[in-house]
Amino acid sequence: MDRRVFLTSAVGFTASQAAITQPAQNRRARRRTQVVAFDGFPVIDSRLIALRAEQLFPGKGDALMTAWRTRQFEYTWLRTLSGRYQDFWHTSEDALIFAAKSIGVSLDDQSRENLMGAYLELKAWPDVRGALESLRAAGIRLVFLSNLTARMLDAAVKNSGLQQFFEPHLSTDRVRAYKPLPKAYEMALRAFGVAREDVVFCASASWDVAGAKWFGYPTFWVNRAGQPAEELGVDADGVGTTLADLVSFVLGVSATE
């Protein structure tokens, strides 16, 4: 299945939606950002999972991670389109089992639990705390709007000592549908009672930028891995490699100020 075709059909992109998102950057310049809604991985450093995969399956860790990530997202989108929701923990576990089979590695119960357990050991990227402090000092409310379960988000926040920064998580479990379905992004509007242009959505993946832009949010892409943007007809309003760049975008100041 072509990911770009899948995403476009899943969200039901129309000309009227495009009209909503085109002036997002200009609206942001006129209005003060009230909320920054984060996908999980601009904040959470997931590299431990890949490291553990290589430790468990020397020489095959990269292949396993590639197959696993691909199937994770395909399963979330397929389950959303079919109305067969299952939370991200269990969806990820199913994807891992399939990925191991697809590359011919033997995944016993202990290895499976070890890999899945890595999700509960993750911590924030080193640049995160300073950025969150700057945003909160400016009176901006911060929240995760993520496919990850509340348990997975809670673990990373606790492991990093960041509990004081975040509002209650907007996990897609609340609406039983994964991003990029519009009702997943809509959670921030309902939670905070604000307009679309008052929320900056901070993504770790270009497809998530597209989903948020189609919904009508100003968007910032933390592109830590230097990936190319998806060819989906929309661009992030801002792009950077760290959360310091996000702070510059939201507050309109230099990251060094």
Image (cartoon, rainbow, N blue to C red):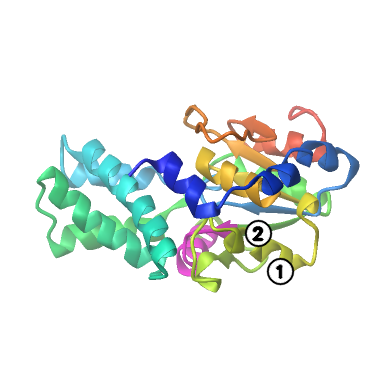
Quick one: 141 or 29, which is closer to the camera? Answer: 29
Residue lying at 51% horizontally and 42% vertically, measured from the top left: 207
Residue lying at 12% horizontally and 60% vertically, measured from the top left: 108
Which residue is disc 2 drawn over? 143
Residue 147 magenta: yes
For the residue labelled by badge 2, is the local secondary structure a helix, a strand or a loop? Answer: strand
Q: Position of residue 87 (x, y in %)?
A: 41, 68
Q: Position of residue 88 (x, y in %)?
A: 40, 63
Badge 1 crowding class, 10 Å Cα cut-off, few under 14, some 14 to 19, many 20 or more, is few
Looking at the rendering, in which quadrant would you find the C terminus? top right
Amino acid type, mark 2: Val
Badge 2 crowding class, 10 Å Cα cut-off, few under 14, some 14 to 19, many 20 or more, is many
Magenta segment: 145-158
Quick one: 57 or 195, which is closer to the camera? Answer: 195
Q: CA distance from mark 1 to mark 2?
A: 10 Å
Task: Mark 1 vs mark 2: give the one in front.
Answer: 1
* Residue 191, label in figure: 1
Image quadrant in which you'd find residue 70: top left
Q: Are marks 1 and 2 in contact (CB under 8 Å)?
A: yes
